[in-house]
Image (spheres, helix red, strand yellow):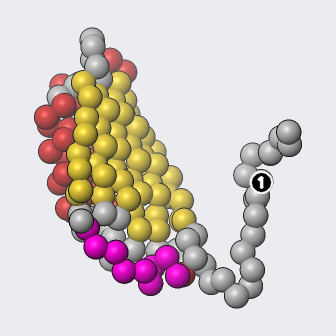
Amino acid sequence: MAAYKKNQHLGSFSNDQKLSHQSKHLLLELYRCDYEKLNDESFLRCALSKAAKLAKATVLNLISNKFEPQGVTAIALLAESHISIHTWPESNYSAIDIFTCGQNMLPELASQYLIEVLKAEEHSLRVIKRNPPEVVFKQMRTVV
């Protein structure tokens, strides 16, 4: 079995396949957040829903789980992909994933809202530009 090196490309596109940077994947880490907000499942569900609206995304479903003695995991399934949050209130820390596809998406607004509403005193944001083939954006899909 072959071992792959970090950041190694496993394949490539032919020259006739155009790539588009219309998909963004934001990896957001929040530090020194409000303990109560990180441990409030209902609050976090509402926060994800509002973040999705700010990103101009359509929420298809929202699931969450509250852990004992503390912590919450929640995910908003979007027509355009997803927003997820995992919290560790005891460490005042949260890891957030915002993945949106499409030209009109505003995932940066969603991330800024979550930074503010969770009262993060520090944060780290990494933006990954996804490269789906152009044909992906030409496909018409409807929410069933």
Label 1: which secondary element: loop
Compared to 60, does 117 lie above or below? above
Residue 129's x, y, as percent? Answer: 54, 65
* Residue highlighted by disc 1: 8
Compared to 38, does 118 lie above or below? below
Residue 75's x, y, as percent? Answer: 31, 43
Q: Nearer the viewer, residue 23 or 79?
A: 79
Residue farthest along the right direction in this orientation = 2
Residue 53's x, y, as percent? Answer: 20, 61
Check if residue 76 falls in the magenta segment: no
Asked if residue 100 shows in the view, the reply is yes
Residue farthest along the front direction in this orientation = 144
Assign the N terminus to one quadrant of the image.
top right
Q: In the image, what residue occupies the spot 13% across and 34% down? A: 42
Q: Nearer the viewer, residue 65 or 87?
A: 65
Q: In the image, what residue occupies the spot 43% across and 80% down? A: 139
Q: In the image, what residue occupies the spot 73% across and 52% down? A: 7
Q: Quadrant of residue 15?
A: bottom right
Assign the C terminus to one quadrant of the image.
bottom left
Direction from residue 125 to residue 13 in the image, left or right = right
Are there few (<14), some (14-19), or many (20+) residues within 10 Å of tag 1?
few
The stretch of residues the image draws in magenta is 135-143
Asked if residue 123 shows in the view, the reply is no
Residue farthest along the bottom direction in this orientation = 16
Direction from residue 93 to residue 110 in the image, left or right = left
